[in-house]
Amino acid sequence: MQFIPYLNFDGNCAEAMAFYAKLFGGQIVHQMTFGEMPASEGMPPLPDALKSCLMHAHLQIGAQTLMGSDALPAMPGQSDACGGGYQKPQGLWVSISVDTVAEGQRVFDGLAEGGQATMPFTQTFWSPGFGMVTDRFGTPWMVNVATQG
């Protein structure tokens, strides 16, 4: 079993995934816009402004996967299950475990650029380095240096 975070964005998924690919040393292996989706029967027309938004992005970071898409606004006659507009994440953190304090500080600083640190990256009783930050895309992260033991 593998758990794969799937992040939603407010029209800036492509920018966020490119940023994460660079920061985490990963590679975007697939992305598709809503405009590239094949038409299906009963699907309402998509406004031109939304066609360039990402329907799906897959970022591979070593053996780890991070996925995401832009949230569509509510569409007439459709349920909110796959749309309804972007809402800031709440009740969760994406946790990253790194091997060294230097790597933890690098990742934390990258995520904090243009974002907001909730807890500065510092030594704690459980880790030589830990911090909490919400990045400029609205995603909340915890960066934790793994302890050997």
Image (spheres, grey):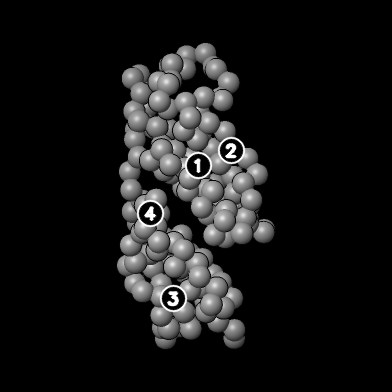
Marks 4 and 1, how far apart at CA: 13 Å
In primary-sequence order, the first of circles 2 and 3 is: 2
Q: What residue appears at the point 34 percent right and 72 percent down from the top-left corner?
A: 119
Amino acid residing under circle 3: Phe
Of pointers 4 and 2, the one earlier in the residue sequence: 2
Residue ID for mark 4: 136
C-alpha distance separating marks 1 and 2: 8 Å
Residue annotated with mark 1: 14
**Label 1 neighbour load within 10 Å: few <14, some 14-19, many 20+:** many
Q: Residues within 10 Å of mark 4 (few under 14, many from 20)?
A: some
The amino acid sitting under disc 1 is Ala
Asked if the residue at tag 2 contacts the one at tag 1, i.e. Cβ–Cβ closer than 8 Å, the answer is: yes
**In what element is the residue under mark 2?**
strand
Counting from the top left corner in percent of width and height, residue 141 is at: 43, 62
Q: Secondary structure at mark 1?
A: helix
**Horizontal arrangement in the rendering, residue 22 relative to residue 116 (left or right):** right
Which dot marks residue 31? 2
